[in-house]
Amino acid sequence: MDQRVASLHESLTGRSQLRVPGWLPGGLSLLVISLILFASLSALFFNAQLASLTTTLFDPYLLRVLRFTLWQASLSTLLSVLLAIPVARALARRTTFRGRSVLLLLLGLPVATPVIVVIFGIVEIYGNNGTLNHLIRLFGFSFQVNLYGLTGILIAHLFFNMPLAVRMLLPAWNQIPDESWRLASQLGMKSGSLFKLIEWPVLRRVLPGSAGIIFLLCFASFAIVLVLGGGPRATTIEVAIYQALRFDFEPSKAALLALIQLVICTLTVALLHHWLRTLPLSSGLATTSQNRPDLNQPGSRLIDFGIILVATTFVALPLLALVRAGLTGPVLSVISDQSLWSAALNSLMIAIAAAGIAFSLGMALLTTSRYLRFHRKQPNRSELLELSGSLTLVVPPMVIATGLFSLLLPFGFVFDWGLVLVAMINGLMVLPYVIRLVGPALLANGEHYHHLCSELGIRGWHQFKLIDWPIIRHPAAFSMGLCATLSFGDLGVVALFGTHDAMTLPLLLYHRIGAYQFEAASVTALILALLCLVVFGVIDLLIGGRRALH
Amino acid sequence: MNPPQFKSKRTVFITSLLWLLTLLTPPLTVADAKPTLTIYTYESFVSKWGPGPLVEKAFEAECSCDLRFIGLEDGAALLSRLKLEGERTSADIVLGLDTSLTKEALETGLFAPHKMNIPELGLSLPWDDAYFLPYDYGHFAIIYDTQRLNNPPHSMKALIENDEGGKLIIQDPRTSTPGLGLLLWVKSVFGTTAPQAWEKLAPRILTVTKGWSEAYGLFLKGEAPMVLSYTTSPAYHMIAEESDRYQAADFAEGHYAQIEVAGKTVNRPQSKLADDFLAFMVSPRFQDLIPTTNWMFPAGRTEKPLPEAFNKLVRPVRTLHFTPNEVATHRKEWINEWLHSMSR
Amino acid sequence: MPFIELEALCYQREDWQLKAAFNLERGECLAVIGPSGAGKSTLLSLIAGFERLISGSIRINGRDYTTAEPADRPVTSLFQEHNLFAHLSVKKNVGLGRDPGLRLNQKDHLAIDQALEAVGLSGYHHRLPESLSGGERQRVALARCLCREHPLMLLDEPFAALDPALRSEMRGLIHQLIKSHDLTVIMVSHHPDEAAEIASSGIFLHQGELKAKGLMSDLLNNPQLPLLRAYLGVS
């Protein structure tokens, strides 16, 4: 009898596992993030003068700017998400048409395209001299679409964000258990009730996250709002920050504005989460096959594909303009330019590093968040942790870079470490995507298996390798692909450190434009977009495996 | 049946670790016997198609030194970087500020007088600054599309008061140098009635962009028949594209000028080398490169004649210009005025 | 000394409290019965370590496990659902009972084979849970419990979703395993008469309190407590 107990002791202590406290990964991650963010902000506050800060705070102009920023961001978010829901639904219903994978890949592209390329693409379709207006004139109508104003801002933001929203909402359908569909079939539920009673509850889970990120993106939108907004009436806080940092050189003012931006965004995202409070998951082995009763309703096929077509066209048009402009330029001379490919290589290195950094930080935060939620039964702290990871999107990279720069200056090695800093800042910037894309899957896994894992003592690395990774592999791959492409197409951060040895592809693009070479720039833009697609696809495939893109 | 995902994941992990390590290793700079001269300038200067590479080659040939450019976004970025760095700056030369920024630059206390004898330099414009030397200049101008506009406005007053010309694309003075240039131009023509002038012009402004690139790009796409740019813009099209399509409108009151300058910093070990560079900068060896790489007019002596196309460019009857002092004093106030007028 | 000593257990959640205390001998099978909301599952959670006690102590074979992590307790649980990892094969699911990192040696492989055989699923090694029936899934989970070689097994109505014949079969299996593997079992059941087939003793919980304790035969055939009578439907 006692042999049993003896072997019990042995089995308990035989194969040891390093026990990392549950709060450690997230804590470390949070530490890194806070250090970088708040250290850089504090550095800017260093020589602040309280008097000028208070005048900034209560400047009526600032209040007006704030109001406008909030308004255009909210409107853009609302529209993007509302329009994304039917598109995501249509895609969720039609899971087996040809080209679906390619379409899903394309949906990740707009948000990774450099801003100036997007502006040109949109103008080419919807501008005064654009395709749409030409078509209207061709049909003999006299009215013209005026892009420059709220319309332009919304179109551009829709272009950026609706595809992203679709991609973020789509996995929600996978969380609906088969049983629900079978029950619905039995009850003869129609499409409308299906949506209200089965689909909406799971959508509600992912909506705050998706809407949150889109809101942050729109809030921090700078060049687009200015150009397509039509003038200084369309000024966002970013413009004020830019002005404070560049022309006026009042870093404390810039930091204050950045802080205000941060606070407002935090509040909004927190509100979103509170309002669309997440509901507990229903039990049952969720599968991806869906026997929806409404698939064969008359006209539903038409509606679905109609929606998909409209959405695809909307997203594809500016991209097609980009392709057309690229193909009609001096393709050969641009392609054979050595500097293009070395710049591309630099961009790639930074992109991969950024994706890696974002993923590590994000996973650390999410693991601890899950630990807090299920082991410590502290869902509020868990949400707070995830929120902190999401906010790096809204602190202007410009501010972080300037702050970091002044912090590191006394140590003298800023230029040499330029690429690292760029990768780090880029990583921080794309961290929210990891949180939003991988978070729900990790959470669901926690919900199903946390008792089992704690019972069996599966934790840490083993839990990640055996239990989590197989499940989160796909959203992880997508998020890393997205992060890489975002970093690849990003201009802002690199330019801030001012090294011209580290030439990246977007920077090269801007150089061409600055040198009047608009046609060559178009070719470069096309190559950039194609490379983005390739990077995305490769990462998705490599990490996500064959079954990626579903 | 089990895909080898774990093994490949380990490989991915290791590879990404290697990437991170390669990035983290700072480039090993081989200690050179040659001294290094560091020049802070703006991005388009150091781009492949800008003057940078040629200047580097030419100067390194005669100085037996290593020229290192650090490219920052634009002139304003240059200044803010200097203020950030303060005395720790590693810049020996700052090249690319324009005269609307020089007063503030001087106030940083980071610049040393150039000690050159100006009359001997043979500059093509009147100059008396002891700290900064000009290397090129240009005039702002409204560029128009000849295919869409037969009768461009011939003066600022005509543009604004007579509603001549159609829609115009401009840049934001808060974020762009040409934008600021237009602001100062309108101010120097209209003086105290500038706000009203802007109010009158506002409805005809298609949009205000963050920088020159977006504005010019939109113009080339045909969004509006006019854009604010430089008198030298048509030269690019004439030379590189052999097209006369885009031309500058010649304004009767004169055009506002942008003069770009360079200066050397104090307390730097390479003081002599910096002096050599400044001398080089106003010499034909540098100046000859300017027209077709920076698309501006050379401020110093040149040996090569200007390209043919440059002779066809608009030569303003008058150069409008505020002193650096005036700009520094009134800039914020004038920008606020502009904002006010445009936001109605 | 009793094998399992649960002393003055006290647990609180919002406005609901659980109080219980009882002992178990080695090899005993105890049934926990009572109406919904009585705290039966909570009691099991507390013993397993998923919830924290406010006060009281849990001693198993003389050692105190009151504050130990679930994995450190000599306890193994079988839930109603989510007993298996849907994406792992039967063998891997069972293997996790031997080592949480699936670092299996010869001895482990043998143990897995034996466990699967004991529950009647030899040869199911490479099947995935989704291809198994409900009963088969629970049997895989049972095999894993065996592999862990923990003396105490907690069953939280794992067979509730199966049909009566299958339930009976499962009970028979449990009974057999108790004997062959020297297990001590605490099981929650909504069918006291069925539980009585393998449980020798039982406790009756009502609204968080242990109201009755004793031999199953006594509890079911001679219920003294009015609450117990009401629960059993005896006049």
Image (tube, rainbow, N blue to C red):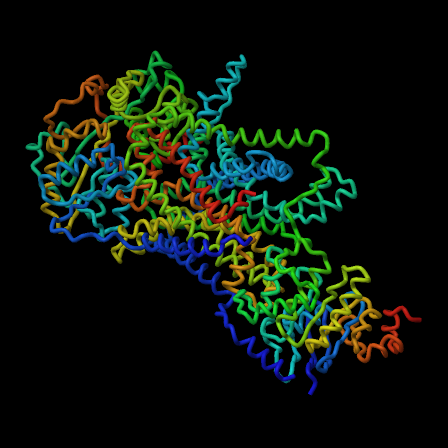
Q: Position of residue B152 (x, y in %)?
A: 33, 15
Q: Residue at x 78, y 62 (%)?
A: C166
Q: Nearer the viewer, residue A508 or A471?
A: A471
Q: Position of residue A292 (x, y in %)?
A: 70, 41
Quadrant position of the C terminus of chain B in the picture: top left
Furthest residue in direction front, as rendered: C123
Residue C97 appears left or right of B335: right
Q: Position of residue B187 (x, y in %)?
A: 30, 28
Q: Residue at x 58, y 55 (%)?
A: A443
Above or below for A408 versus A58: below
Q: Residue at x 72, y 75 (%)?
A: C178
Above or below for B117 versus A469: above
Residue B40 appears left or right of A486: left
Q: Position of residue C156 (x, y in %)?
A: 72, 67
Q: Nearer the viewer, residue A71 or B323?
A: A71
Q: Quarter of the image holding residue B277?
A: top left
- Can residue B122 be seen by looking at this rendering? yes
